[in-house]
Amino acid sequence: MNHPPSVALSRVVVAFSVGLVLGACRAAGDLPSGVAHDAVAHALIDSLVVDEARAADRYQRIVNRFGGVAPFAELTVAPLPRLDALLDVVARRGWVAPDPFAGPIGLEVYADVAGACDVAARFTRLMVSRYDRLLTRTLAPDIRAVTEGNRAAAIGADLARTTACH
């Protein structure tokens, strides 16, 4: 489901709040039968929620700075379906969604669109490497499907466009 960036980021805050309530009600071992909790996979999913939310924010800041320039005008909504899919995984497990804007945030400064492309491509490569690392884990089928789909979409949309825009 596609949402404007402000709606999607609001969803992160709601998921974070609901997760706090659910997390308080569930013991760490209270998971559906047959599904073991993988702390590394959980941490990677949390990192990917942050990555996807920050990508949407980054693209919007670039558009705000330089106008509706390619590829960022098209990319402002690209991370949102991926973020939705990750938040669904988090919610189904009753995990606490991370706040993507908590803690230190390095706001990039771009001299020009080419510099913005370099920064966006670098962060997208890092995000794809997290998806790759998550795929090395033994995952529940729904997590594997989301991970594979999100990885392919990030490579096909974000990485392809940001590496080509130099």
Image: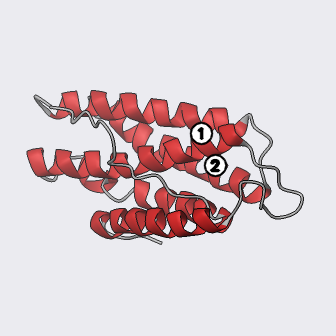
The residue at which mark 1 appears reads as: 131
| Position of residue 145 measured from the top left corner of the image (x, y, whole percent) | 70, 55
How would you rate the neighbour count of disc 2 (Cα within 10 Å): few for under 14, some for 14-19, many for 20 or more? many
- On screen, residue 154 versus residue 166, left or right, reads right
Residue 51 numbered tag: none
Element class at badge 1: helix
Neighbour tally class for label 1: few under 14, some 14-19, many 20 plus, Cα within 10 Å:
many
Label pair 1/2, CB-CB below 8 angstroms: yes
Q: Specify whether 56 is left or right of 1.
A: left
Instruction: Tell me where residue 22 appears, x and y as whole percent.
Output: 59, 68
Q: Which amino acid does label 1 sit on?
A: Tyr
Q: Position of residue 127 (x, y in %)?
A: 49, 36
**Residue at the location (28% across, 66% down)?**
6
Residue depicted at x 56% and y 57%: 86
Instruction: Give the colouring mode of the picture.
Output: secondary structure
Residue 95, compared with residue 100, is above or below; it is below
Residue at image location 27% in from the left, 45% down from the top: 58
- Count of number-bearing discs: 2
What amino acid is at disc 2? Thr
Where is 104 relative to 71, above or below?
A: above
Q: Is residue 112 above or below residue 18?
A: above
Left or right: 135 as drawn, with respect to 71? right
Spot the residue most to the right. 34
The spot of residue 87 in percent (x, y) is 53, 61
Label 2 sits on residue? 147
Q: Could you tell me which quadrant the C terminus lies in?
A: top left
Residue 77 falls in which quadrant of the image? bottom left
The local secondary structure at tag 2 comes to helix
Of residues 5 and 114, the one drawn nearer to the viewer in this rendering? 5
